[in-house]
Each structure stands twice: as structure tokens, then as C-alpha cells.
Image (cartoon, rainbow, N blue to C red):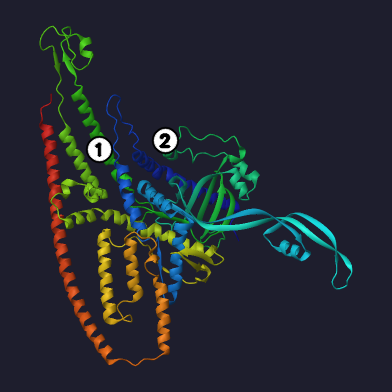
Amino acid sequence: MPMDSVEFQSILKAEIENAVDYYDSELSESRITSLSYYLGEPFGNEIDGQSQVVASEVSDTIEYIMPSLMSIFSKSGQFARFAPRNPEDVPAAEQATTLVNFIVNNDNNGFVVTHNWFKDALLFKLGVVKAYYDESISTTEETYSDLNPNELAILAADPDVEITAQEVTEALALDPISGMDQITESYSVTVSRKKTSGKITLENIPPEEFIFSRRAKSLDDCTFVAHRTTMSVSDLVAMGYDQKTVEEYAGYYDIQNEEEVQIRYGDIETSALNDEPDPTQRQVLVTESYIRSDYDEDGIAELRRVLSIGESCEILENEPWDVVPFAVLSPVLMPHRMVGRSIAEMIEDIQLIKSTILRQMLDNLYLTNNSRINVVEGQVNIDDLLTSRPGGIVRSRAPGMVQPLNVPQIGSQGFQMLEYMDLVRDQRTGFSKASMGLDPDALQSTTAAAVNATIQTSQSKIEMIARVFAETGCKQLASLLLHLAKRHMTSERIIRIDNQFVPIDPRAWDNDFDLEVTVGLGTGREDEKTAMLTQIASKQEQILQLLGPDNPVTSIPQYVNTLRRIAETAGFKDVDQFFNPPAQILQQLQAQAAQQQQQPQQPDPKVALEREKAMAELELQREKMTAELELKRAEAETKAQIRREEMEMEYQLRLAEAQAGRDISTNLPRG
């Protein structure tokens, strides 16, 4: 027996209020601060008449990380890859991979969605994407003339067709069977044809619109999560809801007028939203909740989707559901918490400190160029003194009546502090000139290998963020997209992949797949990747030449796949212009093998002897390569250890220099 509607509404309202209170007390203030720092807003401690410069540390760091993240996720050209669990799952896994990546990159603007998703996470601790099936109905008007009764009946039987106008025309015609004249009817009609279309849609959810239970560790164990936004009365009525009920709860603006939203649009809006003059455009608070509740009172909480409006949570829809349609990610994971840490909050204090140092240095420079003057009252012409111009004179009645007040120079100490704060920032985020290959002091008289090692070491934190994104939100989103495709795609779909039209039918996928998220190949640079792939292709060529195409080590499709990857790494999107797809090559090879089986051949002893000889040579080369790799690995570890010791010594030296500069400035006599 279902739960009483009033009781369920009270439970829902309590969950929403608890989640909103958690957002207001724990998350909102932090996000407001991060956004203010990113936009370079004043701190509120500025003094009139003094420097008010604001450093851009938060913005610089996030904008430095974003290109690297987007490059990592876009290099492979695939958002996710599904791996088969059993041999018979291979074709379905390949089709699932093709479909999910097509949904992300073609049905939606995948680059913009992932860009905003990642940036929300770096800036606001949590990035949220919502995936849902958006079904739309379009109506077209068509006109038909001279229809006979059978044709009219067929047209009227179409459930998507509604006859809006009809005209009957009667005429005499000779019956070929009886030879007598008879009256025939023809019809001219105007119809309204409905066309239902839909697609899986990805939507970036603003952080202030996403609420969830306090103790949530992840979306899997979250008992309550909701998308809380506003919609116009017109949009809700168009969706089929009762106009009178919707208008009763219209007139809500708290979300749009919250401080977090106002700061986001502060540079293009100067005031809060006001009431709309058109009643149909008035805003209504809409909360789409996913709550685990024992609605049927069987002792087990089930997931339900509930759509409610207004602060009183008037329920419009309440239905059982199968999956939460959100994917969330945080750049720095916190154990046992769904919301981790953001990059912005890790360097906000550095931006404040650097801004303070810059302000002090500029104020010191202003005082140096326009120093204060010590004058003897009554002995100096004050008007001359206040008129500052090149070549001007100051009249005084005796020598020494005008003397400047000495201002201590703090430029060198200030620059040392700025360098130290840059070092702290580098340790927290990996953002440095050396990581971008732009620091001439660090790169001068340095080998190419050392420079590359420095760059790769500094980028390790960015790669860690990319791995966290891949294993959390990206995996959630790929699984969600596959679930939506299997649930809502009711017919076969033909999509264009690599200039080929591929039919895909998710209804045939009764199995599950292992999910892998592609985040680039290795951590090296493009030239290193190309060189390594070229070496792999060379070894594959040797194996194919020595052992033939049926060897147990590598196959022709694998060799072609390596060649295609080399072309992709070089930046060529359409690699089919160079090589056929491996699947097509495999089909051709299987067809050739089937033809050869029909014509049995006698084994050639000479060929068998040469194959055994080639296998022995291959084993010898493998042992030699293994020994060389072990030697190179040992050398690389030794060099890396030496480099780490050098960097530690350099850090201690910089720290000592900064401390020495601070001691000197402390011991200087004060004027």
C-alpha cells in the first residue's frame, strides 16, 4: 500500500530544506569566495589613497590547467571505451563505444560540456552534468487532394495524423463492370501530422542548482539529490501541467538573486531580477528530486523521481526510477565525501598574500617618487612647494629649510617574497614557468632530457586530476549514457563514423561491459609518442616478416592500428584516407583464409625450418631487448634520484636566501 501523499510530501520537503541548508552553510560561501578571487574582485580591505591592485593567481592557475586537461581528454578522440567481458561481447562493445562517443561529440557539443564541467570542478569543488532523454514533438500541416475512400481511410488510420479540414467532391463515372454511370466521391483534406523526435541531452548544472544530502559519500549512496531551478509558467504549461496550479506557485526569484549568481553576472548586470510584466513569464521554483524512500511501505527504500514546484513542494510527478541522471567530479578527492577540494581554494591565500606584497611595493614606489617633505614652518613658500613641476623652484629664507623624508627601499625584499610565494604555488599545483618550458634561468645550460623531466614532473599533478576525472565523473557519465541509449532507443540508428555509415541497435545489448575511460596515451610529448609508436610498428613489421601473418605475437590489424595511431598523433582526424579500418582488414583476411581452407595445401618442410629459425632469432632479440630495457630503467631511476636531490637542494637554498633577506630587512635601522 503506498504511503500517504501528505506524509511523503513532508518527507520530501524536509530533505530539500536540509540539503538547501547544507548548501547555504557549507558550500555557498566557499564558492562565492572562489569566484570573487577568480574574477579579481577587491578583497574588502582596501584603503583609500593606497594601492588596490589584485593579483590573478587563481585565474592564472586554472586557465593554465584547463588546456592541459582538455588536451589529455581530446587526444584519443574518444570520450570512453567499453571493453567486452566475454569473446561474444566484442561486436556489441565496439558498437557501444561508437554510440556513446557519437552522443557526446555529435548529438551534443562535447567540447563545451566537458570544458564547463571541468572548470566548475576546478573552481567550485564540484562539477555536475545532467544526462536525460529529451523528447520533442513537432507538428506540420499537409494537404492532400483527389483521395478515394480507401486512401482516406489509410491516412485517417495513422495515429500521428489528425484531419483538420475535409472537402468532398462528387462526380459521375462509368462503372467498367456494369457499364452504367455511378456517383464517385473524392476527398481533399488538410491534416496535422505530429512527429516525435528525441535525443540524449547533456546539460551543465550550475553549482547553486545542485543540492544533495549532507553525509553523501558518492552518488551511489546518496539518499537524496535534486536539481533545483526555476522555469516560466509558459514552459510548465507547455509541458502539460495545469495552468491554475502552476500560476498559484509562480513568482520565485531567490535562486536567480542569490549572491553566487549575482557575482557570476555582476559584470553584465547591475541589479537583481524584478517581476515579469507578462504573467506567463513569471518564474516558478521547480525541484526535480531523486529520493530513496519506502513509498510502497515494504520495508525497503526505493529510488523515486519526484517533480515538485514552489517552496511548499507541491508534487506534480511521483514515479519509481532506475538511475540518478547526474555525473559529478572533484579535482582533489576527499575520502568519504562526495565534495572534494578545488584548485581555487588551494591558492586563494597565495593570491591574497601576493596582492598585499604588490600593494606594499607599489606604495613604496609611489612614496619614493613623491616623497614627503620636511619643512620649517614660516621659512618656506608653501605655494612653491605644493606646485610640483620639472625645473620648478621652492623659495626659502635660509638653507636647509626643505628636506625630503627618506623612504626605505623594499623592492628587493618584495621580489624575494613574490618568488617564494611562486614556489609555494608550484608545490601545490604544479604551475610554474619551468613546467611550460618558459623559464630561461631554469633551462639555461640544461640538457634536453633534464628539461623534459622537469616538465613531466611538474605536470604530474595535472595528470592526477585527469585520472581522477576519468575514474569518477567521466565513468559515471559514460555508464549513464549507455543506460539511456538502451532504454530509449527503440529502433536501429545509423550514424556516420570515419566516413562510414554504421547501423547500431542498442536493443540487442543484453550484456554488460567493462568500462574504460580514455585519457591519452602515456605522459610523454607528441614527438616521444610518435617515436615510440614508430618503434612498435618496426618491431611488428619484423615479426610479420619473420613469422608470417598467422604468428601468435601480432597480427596485421594490430599493425594497421599502430599506423593509424601514428597518423592520429600527428593530428590527422580522418585516418581512413591512409589506412582501412582494422575491422575491415580482419574481414578480408578471414574471407581469404576461408578460401584457402577449401584448397588444402601440403606443408613445406623448408618453410617450417625457416619458421623455427626465425622463432629462435626472435627469442634471442627479445632477451636482448629485455636486458637493454632493464639497464635503461636503472639509469633513468638513478638520474631521477639525482635530479630530485638537486631540486631539493635548490629549494633549501631559495628558502635560506628568502630567510636571510627577511632578517636583513628586520635589522635595518628605521628612519
Residue beneath disc 1: 354
Q: Residue 93 carries which label?
A: none
637 on left or right of 345: left
Q: Is residue 122 visible?
A: yes
The image shows a total of numbered marks equal to: 2
Q: Can residue 334 be seen in this view?
A: no
- For the N terminus, give its image quadrant: bottom right
| Residue at the far right in the pictured view | 180
Q: Which of marks 1 and 2 is in front?
A: 2
Residue at image position (23%, 49%) is: 427
Residue 408 coordinates in the image, percent (x, y): 15, 27
Q: Quadrant of residue 54?
A: top left
Residue beneath disc 2: 267
Residue 229 coordinates in the image, percent (x, y): 51, 46
Q: What residue type is labelled 1?
A: Lys
Residue 451 coordinates in the image, percent (x, y): 19, 54
The tag earlier along the polypeptide, 1 or 2, is 2
The residue lying toward the viewer, choosing from 450 and 150, is 150
Residue at image position (41%, 88%) is: 597
